[in-house]
Amino acid sequence: MTRVTLDQLAGLHRAGTPRGITSVCSAHPLVLRAALRHGRETGATVLIESTCNQVNHRGGYTGMTPVDFAALVARIAGEEGCPADRIVLGGDHLGPSPWRDRPAGAAMAEAETMVAAYAAAGFAKIHLDASMGCAGEPPALDDTATAGRAARLAAAADGAARAAGHPPPRYVIGTEVPPPGGADHALEAIPPTAPEAARQTVAVHRAAFAAAGLAEAFGRVLGLVVQPGVEFGNVNVVAYDRPAAAALAATLDALPGLVFEAHSTDYQGQGPLTALVRDGFAILKVGPELTFVLREALYGLDAIASDLLPDYGERPLKAAMEALMTAALGHWARHYPGPPARQRVLRHYSLSDRIRYYWSAPQAQQAVARLTDALQGVPVPLPLFWQHLPSAADLADRPLDPQALLIRCVGQRLATYHAACHSHTQEQTHVPRRLPT
């Protein structure tokens, strides 16, 4: 299979041979390892993205700067044997969002420093998002103000990339996206972006870049973020409705050189993902689904160890995560409404998977290490896999490698995305035994 690059997506779509690229939006080392291993095995482009809140020049909530994140990916890639020329680093929602409680001047100064740090660290794909109002401004800015600020950010990124000896970045514009990490309530349907709104976004950004002397930079815009009508809440998924998005998809006919970037495609399954790619949503972003299946596998192993090993205890990993989340409510409390019993379920099992913010805590890492050490090399009887982790039942009755199992579970979901992105080639790509409904 010939590897598809970001710059080829628009041409392939217009030629009637649509292909896609999966954007892995996670900083979890095991998710990154699974993505890089998958890239090594398939030959596909490995697009890994971090957000402005997750990674920035001040550390973000992961504690990593763009240079740190790039170094982490490079280290794991080296360990996995994934060629560097197959990896693309991206920055998602890069703009003033982390500092929007400040006046616009101060917030944009931080945003320019951040986007410059991303570009200097070699991030080659940058989503410019200056749509949010800052202190004293409306919550959402109009297209003209958004585009003007996006042009400022592009200028900062271009300058930093060139100064560091990197090619100038490719850009993604547009901000009509679902709430980061999924919605907080059950959803029945999501209207797709109106075609005229998509065309207006492109026209206003083109004009703003030209006015700033950045027409060449606008030529490196490869994608437009729109809402295709997909979303997930805490407990449900809104699947892609192809007829409802037909008018939006047709908009690409008048936007040569562009494809759509679809956010929150988690839990769609192969059929809807394949339809998205065929309709021009060629960049498929996924994040919470990957850490959800990682948590699912960890909890399955936690239950297996509790049943199998007399000295392990009763679900100590789950207990450790419950203690962490109830001691530090900031990442989940406003997202998980309802009475305490419902909140307790959502803390562990919500599709938004806000438990992902806690895996880097020392207590969580210690609990995971205790689990994997306890089961390393231990044969697990088939009935225990059937009971707690049926997707791994083929590993029964032989020495277990817990980390390999965890990486495989994430890789199975990446295989679903890979199959959707390359469906027209009729590849026989492995699909997980269990897909979201």
Image (spheres, rainbow, N blue to C red):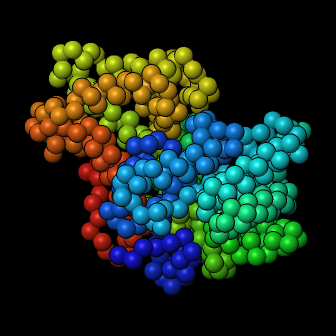
Is residue 315 positioned above or below 179 on the image?
above
In the picture, measured across the screen, residue 206 lies left or right of residue 59, that is right
- Residue 342 visible to the viewer: no
- Residue 259 visible to the viewer: yes
Is residue 253 positioned above or below 187 on the image?
below
Q: Quadrant of the N terminus?
A: bottom left
Is residue 167 positioned above or below 123 on the image?
below
The location of residue 417, given as percent across then percent down, is: 40, 59
Q: Who's the residue at 71% across and 76% down the image?
A: 219
Q: Who's the residue at 25% across and 51% down the image?
A: 433
Q: Quadrant of residue 306?
A: top left
Relative depth, front residue between 65 and 277: 65
In the picture, measured across the screen, residue 294 lies left or right of residue 84, that is left
**Residue reaching furthest to the bottom:** 15
Q: Quadrant of residue 60?
A: top right
Q: How many marks?
A: 0
In the picture, measured across the screen, residue 190 lies left or right of residue 290, that is right
The location of residue 62, given as percent across then percent down, is: 57, 37
The location of residue 383, given as percent across then percent down, is: 13, 32
Q: Who's the residue at 74% across and 71% down the image?
A: 217
Is residue 237 positioned above or below 248 on the image?
above
Relative depth, front residue between 413 and 375: 375
The location of residue 253, given as percent across then percent down, is: 62, 80
Q: Who's the residue at 53% across and 33% down the image?
A: 357
